[in-house]
Amino acid sequence: MLHYSVDHELMSDLYRDYRQIKGAEYEQIHALGEHYLAIAQDYDLADSTMKSIQGLIRFQTDEELEGVETGIVHGYLTAKAALRKEQAEYREFVELFNGEEKQALNGLAEYVVGQKRIPYKIKNRTLHVDVLSTPALSLELDFTDVLIEDGRHPREILITHLSGERFERIETIKGTDGTEAKITVPYYRLSFVNGLSEGPYQVKESSFVFRGLQGSLCLYNYDSAMEPLDVNADKLPWRILMHPLKAMLEKAQILGVESLDRDELQALPLLCVFYELIQFYLAPTTEAGVGRSLIRFDEELAENFAFSQEDLNATCEYLAPYGMEELTGWLHKAISEKSAFCRYWIQFASMKKAETLYKILTDILDECSRYYEKKPMPLSCRKHRSAVRRALNEYFCRHKWRGEFPNYRRSEASGFLEVSNVYKRMYTYINEKQKAFFVDFIEGVTENSYTVTAVSGYVLLKDGENARDYRALSGYFLDGGRRNSHIVGQITIDDMMSSDQVIELLNTMMQDIMKEFNPNK
């Protein structure tokens, strides 16, 4: 059964708001009480609720406020207990099902309730719910033989409370010989609170009955999982890697490690460790620089690393064949010498030698996901992707660049003096032989759009190095001033655009990109 009540909801909100201003001036706390008293006028609330609200308005001393605070906390704890009971009862209901149906019902409570609006549309007596969609999986639910019990219903709902029950009905069936018989037919009911209302706490309890349930789980290749990039993003390779890395770990968290195949299970400790380390490196409070004395980071974030020494040892064992002894040596000390390790890691992740680790992790994710099918692309991507790639290939070929989508390059003799500025430090190189230029295109997709982001970069090639071995992203792994890269353009395409509009966007972006390499034209 549902355990919703206005008292519970209001006391939970009051507790939250009071905590935010606790210790403020009396006038501010009195104003909070007046605000909730105005809301309370529209409801028949319990005496204990009204006493807490009025107490916030009337108190004059710290001792009186302490008594009011006790009442607010008690109201909040009562509301939490009711919610926990409701959730426990729903879990018991879910145990009536198995397999993907059970996964989908659990997903309904975990990823839909209180989080997203869903269409409330019955078609052929079936209610379809998209429970969850990530780059690595989709989880859907179909309730069949549905009957909505409260008559007219809205087009969409936001479920804030949910309960389920099984019951039986006696129904009469007619045999082939015309005789009638009574049978017991199992039914199920989902009751919920629709949080979409015109005012605070003006919600509606609703329910529907169904006879059948079908869950559908699809697993996808997540190696190319990519959301649109922020055009101001730094540390770009690691931001790109986080998309498939997060998708894989989300799958393990949502479906359990039993959903992983052999390659994923073997790589899981390593991927968990580097997910945390990369997330730490990408934090706004983490600043890389030339030399460890210029490195800044939030020590509290470092204290929150969740990996264990066992995880670190497994990571080092996995990396052993790749010849990264310096990194693995530091990883062994990531817990015992945390501050020193963090400084090492931030500097390492910014530098040329980290490109090897980046390629290793990219290859691991590719290997882990290669047996899964590709996730269907949104219409905007399916409609224009081939034309975008073809147009870019033709453009770069016409301008004497080599390569094909998504990577292009060209080389030229470097100037006698090459000057670059990296991390606010000036570098000058004299009489280098060759300078290679690169442009990479990174695709991103959302439900309604297809984004193409352009990254340009350069590398001053050393003897024996070949431009074919580099990409624009290589410029983010610094080697003094010999490399650098940045985002130079981005276009976003939706499914309403015509081919001509897309080509016009591409041409404008390409003109801006070419100015990077021919600033006087």
Image: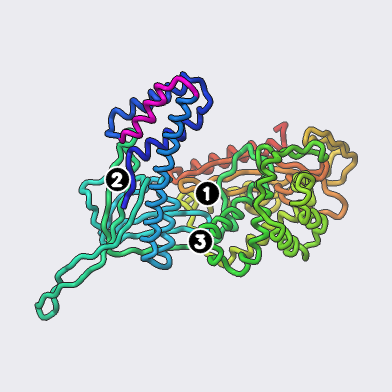
Q: Name the quadrant containing residue 319.
A: bottom right
Mark 3 lies on a secondary structure that is: helix
289, above or below 363, in the image? above
Q: Which residue is mark 2?
A: 155
Residue at point 58%, 37% (across, down): 508
Separation of marks 2 and 3 at Cα, in angstroms: 30 Å
Label 1 vs 2, first from the N-terminus: 2
The type of residue carrying mark 3 is Leu
**Residue 56 part of the magenta-drawn span:** yes
Using the numbered discs, state the Cα–Cα distance from disc 1 to disc 2 in whole angstroms: 27 Å
- Which residue lies at the image location 77% right of the left edge and 65% below the top edge? 321
Q: Is 484 included in the stretch rendered in magenta?
A: no
Residue shown at 41% from the left, 53% from the top: 109
- Dot 1 lies on which element? strand
| Image position of 46 with respect to 253: above or below | above
Q: Which residue is mark 3?
A: 255
Q: Earlier in the sequence, mark 1 or mark 3?
A: 3
Q: Residues within 10 Å of mark 1 (few under 14, many from 20)?
A: many
Going by the numbered disc 1, the residue's amino acid type is: Val
Could you tell which of marks 2 and 3 lies nearer the N-terminus? 2
Task: Name the residue furthest bottom.
Answer: 177
- Mark nearest the camera among 1 and 3 is 3
Residue drawn at 60 percent across, 58 percent down: 223
Which SS class for mark 2? loop
Which label sits on residue 445?
1
Q: Which residues are magenta?
A: 46-62
Total number of numbered labels?
3
**Residue 440, percent from left and from top:** 66, 48
Image coordinates for residue 409, horizontal then vertical, percent: 72, 49
